[in-house]
Amino acid sequence: MTKMEAFDPFNVSDADDLFTATVTPKSEPDAPVKTRLPSFNIKPQYVAKDKAPPVHVLPKMDVKFKLFEEVTSKAVLGMGEDGTVELFVEGKVMAQAESSISRIPPFSLQITSPPLNECDIVFQNFCKVQSERKIQVSKQRSIKCKVDIPQQKAECEMLRYSITVETKNMPLLVQSKATLKEKNCRVGIQIRSNLSNQGDINDLSISIPIPNTMQESTVKITRGADTGSWDECKRMVTWKIGTLAHGQSVLVSVEAEISHTMAQLLADDDLSSAKFNEKINCPVLVRCSSSSDTLTDFALSASPWMEDPSNLSLQQDQSYRLLHRVPTRK
């Protein structure tokens, strides 16, 4: 009898293998069981360059101020020996601005100046005054302006100011004295640079007009002969000192015989030293300049304008030219 084949039309015997677990014995008791973890292929995500958030960079601006003062001054006599001097100042402020962009952003200008009755300020059209207040402690005034320079220029005038004030803080101290020995009159001048100066005094010159009370044919420079000269036509003795270093002093002198009229006056009247200086009448004229100082309390500062900000840097230069007169002491 032939063996009958197993009746399995649905292949159930093959499906049993799906439910049959195959256990493989460990080769070693302590060997670790290796588990294969699933792997994930994750690609990095990049943000397109044109979709990055914009970064606002402030434009860079360099501002330079040049403050120059033309000063004439006169020693005030009859007020003791306190060294009071009357100043007449004509000041000018030049401005230069450069920007990293095609235009010049506006900026805020702060001015500290003497009171209104001592200082008059004239602004250019591109400087608009925003506020003004009085500083009670120093009795000065503070002015805030919006400066909108129209275009990039080498230099442009920003403002002018005029100041008339009395001060004791001069860059140099001038002392003069006339003495008489027999018929010879000697006039001596000493000038000292103020220790509070920021730098040296430049282009220093000293001039003395020789009055008619002294004989021009007898004029002789006794101190500073290497820097002094006598102009007989102008009746003027001038010493061109040049640079006077910070805190240093210089002494010059000239002598001449007094006139016959002056000699007769002295013989008739016993004049005191003060009266003699008045009769001699030798005023002193001093000219000088500085590239690192000013003679007033006029001060400037600058900052970015809040509505149109910039990365602002400021540089300031200040200078003056002085003509100082010391009249005959009475």
Image (spheres, grey):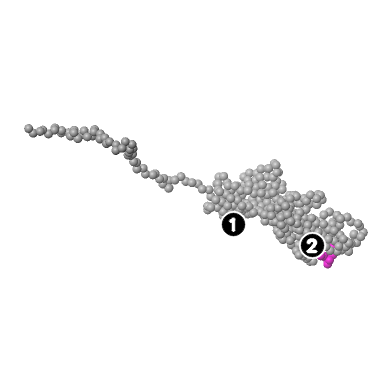
| Callout 1 secondary element | loop
* Res 234 seen here: no
Q: Residues within 10 Å of mark 1 (few under 14, many from 20)?
A: few
> In the shown orientation, is residue 29 left or right of residue 4?
right
Q: Amino acid at mark 1?
A: Ala
User: Is 40 included in the stretch rendered in magenta?
Assistant: no
Task: Provide residue 196's location: percent of width, then percent of height.
Answer: 71, 51
For this view, does 101 lie left or right of residue 192?
left
Quarter residue 321 falls in:
bottom right
Per the rendered image, the range of residues in magenta is 214-222
Q: Which disc, if any, is residue 4? A: none
Q: Is 221 included in the stretch rendered in magenta?
A: yes
Q: Amino acid at mark 2?
A: Arg
Please state if 62 lies on the left or on the right of 318 as rendered.
Answer: left
Which of the 4 image quarters holds residue 214? bottom right
Could you tell which of marks 1 and 2 lies nearer the N-terminus? 1
Q: Which residue is mark 2?
A: 223
Q: Residue at x 31, y 37 (%)?
A: 28
Asked where in the image residue 322 lies, by quadrant, the reply is bottom right
Give percent across and percent down for residue 264: 90, 61
Q: Is residue 81 visible?
A: yes
281 over 120 or under it: above or below: below
Give the position of the N terminus as an image quadrant.
top left
Residue at image location 58% in from the left, 50% down from the top: 313
Q: Which mark is residue 154?
A: 1
